[in-house]
Image (cartoon, rainbow, N blue to C red):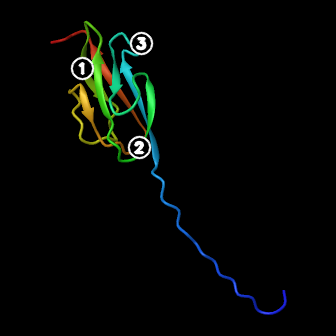
Amino acid sequence: MNGDKRVRAVFEREPAQAKTVTLYLRADPGDGTGGYVHLSNGSGSTPGQRDFAVGDKPKLEARPAQGWCFHSWSGVTLATVWDYFNSKATFVIEGDLTVTAKFTTSCD
């Protein structure tokens, strides 16, 4: 190169991409005899998994099989706005999470 040169650089910020996390759905007992978990704002049921963006609010419903009752949820340590004994649940997902619906034949 001979002589002084002028260089101009233009930098553009790429839009931030939402972090994707995975929600894993399980039922107890795991063979499906007690029921399953339905994900109402997207495809999915137990056993299964679905990706969400951090901050999304999955809507779950525990659906017991005939002769079974919903008992409780487990695995929600990263969730907020949660009622462990309600068969319908909505919460804010903050990271990868495994949620299990427990079913029982003791329907008192």
Distance, label 3 to label 1, CA atoms, is 16 Å
49 or 73: which is nearer to us?
49
Under circle 2, the secondary element is loop
Q: Which residue is found at the position 40% from the left and 16% from the top?
A: 30
Residue type beneath disc 3: Asp
Residue 10 placement: quadrant: bottom right
Rendering coords of residue 2 (x, y %): 84, 90
Residue type beneath disc 1: His
Specify the quadrant that holds the N terminus.
bottom right
31 or 16: which is nearer to us?
16
Disc number placed over residue 31 in the picture, else none = 3
Rendering coords of residue 45 (x, y %): 39, 23
Label 2 environment density (alpha carbons within 10 Å; few <14, some 14–19, many ≥20): some
Q: Which residue is found at the position 25% from the left and 6% from the top?
A: 67
Label 1 environment density (alpha carbons within 10 Å; few <14, some 14–19, many ≥20): some
Distance, label 1 to label 2, CA atoms, is 25 Å
Disc number placed over residue 95 in the picture, else none = 2
38 vs 22, left or right, is: left
Residue type beneath disc 2: Gly
Under circle 1, the secondary element is strand
Disc number placed over residue 71 in the picture, else none = 1
Q: Which residue is found at the position 26% from the left and 13% from the top?
A: 104
Distance, label 3 to label 2, CA atoms, is 26 Å
Specify the quadrant that holds the C terminus.
top left
